[in-house]
Image (spheres, coloured by chain):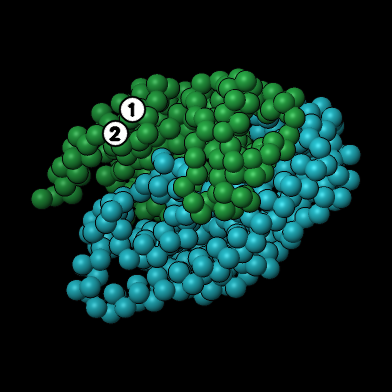
Chain colours: A cyan, B green
Amino acid sequence: MDRSAEFRKWKAQCLSKADLSRKGSVDEDVVELVQFLNTRDQFFTTSSCAGRILLLDGGINGFEVQKQNCGWLLVTHKPCEKDDVIVALKKANGDATLKFEPFILHVQCQQLQDAQILAVRSTHGLEVPLSHKGKLMVTEEYIDFLLNVANQKMEENKKRIERFYNCLHHALERETMTNLHPKIKEKNNSSYTHKKQRNPEKAHVQCITKENDKELENDDDDLGINITIFPEGY
Amino acid sequence: MDRSAEFRKWKAQCLSKADLSRKGSVDEDVVELVQFLNTRDQFFTTSSCAGRILLLDGGINGFEVQKQNCGWLLVTHKPCEKDDVIVALKKANGDATLKFEPFILHVQCQQLQDAQILAVRSTHGLEVPLSHKGKLMVTEEYIDFLLNVANQKMEENKKRIERFYNCLHHALERETMTNLHPKIKEKNNSSYTHKKQRNPEKAHVQCITKENDKELENDDDDLGINITIFPEGY
């Protein structure tokens, strides 16, 4: 079985499986994007989250939260109100942490150069310890302020999903164009993805994540790692 | 010029350049790891951070921090004390945010399958708004508590760097072994990197980041994206 046939078979298997996330369905704000990707032969999505505000009841001390299954006191994909958090915090008996997790998307790609245009991870988050051993460590005024920040991040995150969707459209259109015109393709596909020599597809997606990086001098790529991509048939 | 010669030339160019980070040198805790990677023909590092506690004075409102260059009130790669933060916060006139940023490493790889064993990004962070329009929104007691959490994350982060370094050693040893024994290689390199069929190299690095993901049901890969890796000569 050739590579594309194997990929098609694997894609069909994965997409036919039940959604095993707690929510059990794709988030409303990314349904269109996920469907768009899954209509393309060279891609399929394996998981996604449009962005959410989470209140977790973890172990005592920040890093121990990582070491045990921690309770979900609250989770929402919509703007969140102070009273909801106050009520949920009453159930906390460990170290409760409020998190804003931005849009995330896991995509399988048939060919490696397709991965260039799907390298997206926003650093636009929040992770705020609120209580220690069940005792609230901040004021209600602070929670109000924090949720204002979180809700604004949620709004900004929505805009980024739209921009990513638009950029993806352009990138894939451009890719189709270059496939039709091999000379342009040769020109665009450098054998390495240099930071200052991104090919057009990469450049398109960079526009989404670049603004996150002004405060992160060492995070000037949208993944935590640079991967050298060789053009097809290199 | 063949691919490996081109990579060697590019590596030499990059490693000969001055360190343009604010700090101007590789962080003490990752020097050994960075040097180890740069002695391998198939890799070189382009940037790294061992992990740091940052206090940023951003724009008004959380997401506007992203939209402007924001001032660094404090940055340390060592455990941080409350008084240092209190003093630094006095200089804030916007929305100050305390962040813990874990170990991050940017690596260029000669071949794509090498990227599998270098896919590392910890989600072990903190991002906590502390002041609004220059006004402190939390108590000193909270800052003390928060720094306790941040310093513990710093400690845990150090352990993870060591574990990553050890796992990398094993992965590269194993890779060398499989290169010496093609039959093992065929067995280990599946044509796709399925979540439940990671090859041994991938599995080695997973052990570092997996524990971050218990609270992130949709973040069960160490990158924000899955990339399908084809074995060399597929």
The answer to whether one can see residue B111 in this image is: yes
- List x then y, in percent, for residue B97: 60, 39
Q: Is residue A18 left or right of residue A163?
A: right
Relative vertical location of residue A69 with respect to residue A160 in this rendering, above or below: above
Query: Which numbered disc covers residue B25?
Result: 1
Marks 1 & 2, CB-CB < 8 Å contact: yes
The chain holding disc 2 is: B
Closer to us: A125 or B190: A125
Q: Residue at x 72, y 26 (%)?
A: B140
User: Circle 2 sits in a helix, a strand or a loop, which is it?
Assistant: loop
Q: Amino acid at mark 1?
A: Ser
Closer to us: B115 or A18: B115
Query: Which numbered disc covers residue B19?
Result: 2
- List x then y, in percent, for residue A217: 41, 41
Label 2 crowding class (10 Å Cα cut-off): few <14, some 14-19, many 20+?
Answer: some
Q: Is residue B98 left or right of residue A185?
A: right
The chain holding disc 1 is: B
Relative vertical location of residue A62 with respect to residue A172 in this rendering, above or below: above
- The quarter of the image holding the C terminus of chain B is bottom left
Relative vertical location of residue B194 with respect to residue B126 in this rendering, above or below: below
User: Circle 1 sits in a helix, a strand or a loop, which is it?
Assistant: loop
Q: Residue at x 63, y 55 (%)?
A: A153
The answer to whether one can see residue B171 in this image is: no
Closer to us: A21 or A9: A21
